[in-house]
Image (spheres, helix red, strand yellow):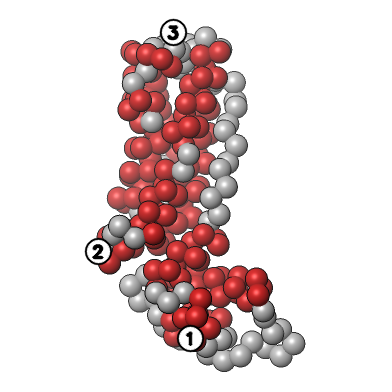
């Protein structure tokens, strides 16, 4: 539990109800999660940080993973980012991977729960996996379709595993290392692995011609 907060009522004149109260509780949960980690997170610590009682928390979220899941949904709403349109497949993919890296960075502090057997198969585990993937398979398909209209490639000849490879590798590395890959690493992934595979399977030779 954090040592710089004390359990108690909110400051006078700031009594919270409804959505405002729930948002304050979930913000406190997120802050406590960042401060102490999932394994050390307690209802006492969250209640102290939120200046409320444990009963208020238990009434809404009877299990710790339910509380953490609610905080994740509150702080990282699953709003899909716009699919990049830079005018070339290479720079489109680089921009998309930048968006994915930013998204995963939001949940990096709580990725440790994926190694907790008590969360395996739970809604929390499912949510983290969903957040790591998002709808990026659909985003990659859109990027490849757009590239086809520009004459860069033929998506019908590109295996699904190749199409989703950039997203899978970036997400997989972040889930394992808990760190975002460097821009140089992402660029190398696109230039040295993805684009050569695209050219091999369905490229016209123009897929790698995005600005370098």
Q: Position of residue 68 (x, y in %)?
A: 44, 68
CA gap, disc 3 and disc 2: 47 Å
Q: Is residue 13 left or right of residue 163?
A: right
Q: Nearer the viewer, residue 112 or 181?
A: 112
The number of numbered badges drawn on the structure is: 3
| Callout 1 crowding tier (Cα within 10 Å): few <14, some 14–19, many ≥20 | some
| Residue lying at the far right of the rendered structure | 13
Q: Earlier in the sequence, mark 3 or mark 1?
A: 1
Dot 2 falls on a residue whose secondary structure is: helix
Residue drawn at 56 percent across, 12 percent down: 150
Residue drawn at 35 percent across, 57 percent down: 125
* Residue 28 vertical placement versus 1 (above, below): above
Q: Which mark is residue 117?
A: 2
Mark 1 lies on residue: 54
- Indicate which label's residue lies in the foreground, 3 or 1: 1
* Residue 18 vertical placement versus 80 (above, below): below
């Amino acid at each position: 539990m954090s040592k710089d907060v004390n359990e108690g009522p909110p400051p006078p004149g700031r009594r919270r109800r409804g959505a405002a109260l729930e948002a304050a509780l979930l913000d406190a949960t997120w802050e406590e999660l960042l401060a102490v980690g999932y394994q050390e997170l307690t209802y006492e610590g969250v209640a102290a940080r939120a200046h409320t009682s444990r009963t208020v928390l238990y009434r809404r979220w009877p299990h710790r993973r339910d509380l953490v899941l609610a905080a994740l949904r509150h702080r990282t709403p699953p709003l899909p980012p716009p699919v990049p349109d830079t005018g070339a497949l290479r720079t489109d993919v680089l921009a998309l991977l930048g968006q994915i890296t930013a998204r995963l960075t939001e949940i990096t502090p709580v990725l440790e729960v994926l190694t907790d057997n008590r969360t395996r198969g739970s809604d929390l585990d499912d949510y983290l996996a969903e957040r790591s993937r998002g709808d990026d398979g659909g985003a990659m398909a859109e990027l490849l379709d757009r590239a086809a209209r520009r004459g860069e490639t033929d998506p019908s000849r590109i295996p699904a595993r190749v199409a989703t490879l950039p997203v899978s590798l970036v997400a997989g590395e972040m889930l394992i290392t808990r760190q975002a890959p460097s821009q140089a690493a992402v660029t190398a992934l696109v230039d040295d692995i993805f684009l050569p595979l695209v050219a091999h399977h369905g490229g016209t030779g123009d897929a790698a011609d995005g600005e370098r």
